Image (cartoon, helix red, strand yellow):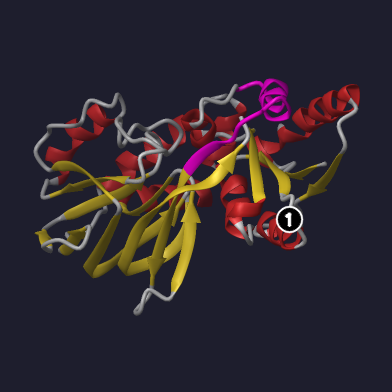
Amino acid sequence: MYYFIVNIASSSGKARGAWHALEAELKRRGTPYRAFFTRYQGHAGELAGKLTSKAGGGGISLVAVGGDGTANEVVNGIKDFAKVRFGYIPIGSGNDLGRGLSLPKDPVAALKLILESEECHAMDLGKVSWGRKLEKSAYFNISSGIGMDAEVCRRVNASGMKVFLNRLHFGRLSYFIQTILTLAYMPDVRARVQFDGGEKKRVRGLICMASMNHKCEGGGLPMAPNASDQDGKLSICYIYGLSKLQALLPLIALTRGKHLGFPGIEVKDCSFCELWLENALAGHTDGEDLGDLVHLRYECLPGALKVMR
């Protein structure tokens, strides 16, 4: 039995037609399944929690149908990763998880991979903790960030630009436009960062820090071109110490994955990382807003998610 959590509203409503095609394929194959449709933000996580809490010794095959946000909600709702075989059918505007897992863009082709999967892909998961005592936490499939990339996600989600450009098949453009607009208003923030419990490094003028489990975020932006979801580490890309004018060229290079080696851009692979900020900056996990934060910890959970593909 396969359990599907479907976000019909994904990709400005295009997921509805995709689900009809998926359901037709399931019926054609005679595959036993149950489908659950999300009705509000957070509902996918609630459904995942209820379904996985009832999983027996044989586990459960759970498939998320929607965008990166839907996949994030489902994974954060899972009660016991050891009992779950996770599948993902990417139907969103960003589709960074599908890109990272090399999944087909065609939903029916992605479904066939899941149904014919014999061995699961053991994917690392990221975990971010925040708060005065790091008492809050969330998992991420793709990335979690602080600063400009989080502020861009916030602005894209709050504006109507993404929906409009999605209809023109230019959804990725909304992230680039907001990146340029956001850069002009970024404050000068001092921070301290510590990798794998080593010496704390002082950072002045932090523009952003992205903790990457996959190579791309923001609809294909290759923040960490060498990241792997099976190496037991996160790739931390952080940009700092640049004026707004100086940052323009590296950011343009970043869109092509050619930013490594620019002054003010560093990438560090680590098992965990802790960050302290003098002033709060916006935070996100897989594009989902975490609020304004001053203390965070990122860590990698090696091979935690068993992915059918």
For residue 111, above or below residue 56: above
User: As rendered, which of 273 and 307 lies closer to the eye?
Assistant: 307
Q: Residue at x 30, y 57 (%)?
A: 272
Q: Residue at x 75, y 28 (%)?
A: 18
Is 119 within the magenta? yes
Disc 1 is placed on an element classified as: loop
User: As rendered, which of 40 and 134 lies closer to the eye?
Assistant: 134
Is 300 within the magenta? no
Residue reaching furthest to the front? 57
- Name which quarter of the figure residue 68 lies in: top right
Q: Position of residue 80 (x, y in %)?
A: 62, 59
Pointer 1: what residue? 57
Dot 1 surroundings within 10 Å: few (below 14), some, or many (20 or more)?
few
Where is the C terminus found, in terms of image quarters?
A: top right
Q: Is residue 220 left or right of residue 102?
A: left
Q: Residue at x 66, y 21 (%)?
A: 106
For residue 67, above or below residue 292: above
Residue type highlighted by circle 1: Gly
* Residue 123 in view here: yes
Write the start and end of the magenta stretch as one range: 105-123
Q: Is residue 200 left or right of residue 103?
A: left
- Name which quarter of the figure residue 291 lies in: bottom left
Q: Position of residue 60 (x, y in %)?
A: 73, 48
For residue 131, above or below residue 141: below
